[in-house]
Image (tube, helix red, strand yellow):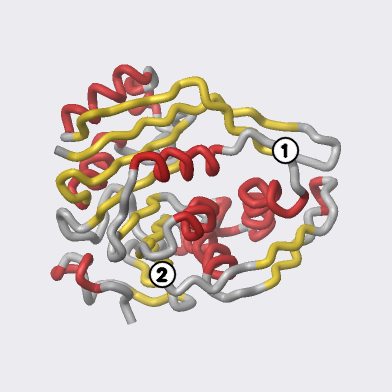
């Protein structure tokens, strides 16, 4: 059964398939799955889970983007009980994990293109599992994570450039480390802003480390801010001095991302 169907465009409401209980609006071909490291190699999902949640399990001290997102939303938002928050590019669900405690009465939609990422998010957020993950190949001890069973989190697979949501259906839209991965940045942002309600809150974080050559024209924060304004996001604020740290192994080797955070509201 499709969760909260009132937010889905009527023309696509019956055009999805279910995979492991997850509605898929952009199913992948066998060739696409074989070429996608997140779909074809489960060890990549295990390691990505560590990058997202390791600080919780081992009390690793890092500069985490997730706590900063939580703080900005907490400062900026007074959400109604029935508010709908879309986390686009939710991956294994780390932002949803954090925000579900801050806004327990909201409804959360987690969307990702990778079905394997969503399967792991489902284990962590919906199934109340205790996950035991072997990370010995990265020199890390076994990783144990206690999951949740959140009735207000709904996961869906979809393409950021062809979202299935109705216009003006979301109160808040978050995307974390997504825009550098999409094929067409302008189209993806148009899709995001289309489904956001007037006055709705928009928050974006990115290292601006684009994987598509065409998108590098937006590599400067001021240019990206101009595009957001053109597409209908106003009253924007940004921080360009945030660092997000990923702990890579038990010796403390790290990868540090210089990260931009932008937030504002739809006209």
Q: Is residue 4 left or right of residue 257?
A: left
Disc 1 to disc 2, how far (Cα)? Answer: 29 Å
Q: Which residue shows up at 78% across the image and 54% down it?
A: 135
The image shows a total of numbered marks equal to: 2
The residue labelled by disc 2 is 152
Q: Position of residue 241 (x, y in %)?
A: 51, 21
Q: Quadrant of the N terminus?
A: bottom left
Return the disc, 1 or 2, that comes first in the chain's sequence: 1
Q: Going by the picture, which residue comes out furthest to the bottom?
A: 1
Residue 229 placement: quadrant: top left
Dot 1: element: loop
Residue 32 placement: quadrant: bottom left
Q: Which mark is residue 150?
A: none
Q: Which residue shows up at 47% across the image and 55% down it?
A: 102
Q: Is residue 177 left or right of residue 218?
A: right
Q: Which residue shows up at 56% across the image and 54% down it?
A: 38
Q: Callout 1: 10 Å neighbours few (<14), some, many (20+)?
A: few
Q: Which residue shows up at 28% across the image and 24% down it?
A: 225
The residue labelled by disc 1 is 61
Q: Callout 2: 10 Å neighbours few (<14), some, many (20+)?
A: some
From where the camera sits, is residue 34 visible?
no
Q: Position of residue 23 (x, y in %)?
A: 37, 71
């Amino acid at each position: 059964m499709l969760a909260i169907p009132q937010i889905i465009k009527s023309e696509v409401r019956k055009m999805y398939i279910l995979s492991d209980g997850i509605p898929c609006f952009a199913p992948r071909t066998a060739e696409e799955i074989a070429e996608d490291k997140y779909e074809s190699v489960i060890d990549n999902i295990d390691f990505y889970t560590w990058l997202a949640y390791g600080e919780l399990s081992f009390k690793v001290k890092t500069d985490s983007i997730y706590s900063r997102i939580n703080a900005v939303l907490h400062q900026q938002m007074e959400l109604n009980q029935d508010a709908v928050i879309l986390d686009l590019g939710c991956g294994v669900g780390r932002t949803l994990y954090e925000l579900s405690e801050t806004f327990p009465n909201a409804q959360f939609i987690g969307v990702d293109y990778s079905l394997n990422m969503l399967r792991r998010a489902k284990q962590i957020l919906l199934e109340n599992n205790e996950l035991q993950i072997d990370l010995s190949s990265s020199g890390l001890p076994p990783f144990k994570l206690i999951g949740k069973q959140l009735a207000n989190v709904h996961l869906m697979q979809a393409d950021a450039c062809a979202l299935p949501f109705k216009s003006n259906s979301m109160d808040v839209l978050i995307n974390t480390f997504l825009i550098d991965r999409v094929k067409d940045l302008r189209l993806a942002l148009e899709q995001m802003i289309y489904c956001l309600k007037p006055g709705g809150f928009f928050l974006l974080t990115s290292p601006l480390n684009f994987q598509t050559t065409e998108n590098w024209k937006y590599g400067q924060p001021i240019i990206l801010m101009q595009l957001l304004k053109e597409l209908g996001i106003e009253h924007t604020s940004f921080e360009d001095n945030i660092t997000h740290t990923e702990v890579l192994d038990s010796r403390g080797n790290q990868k540090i991302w210089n990260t931009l955070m932008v937030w504002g509201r739809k006209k």
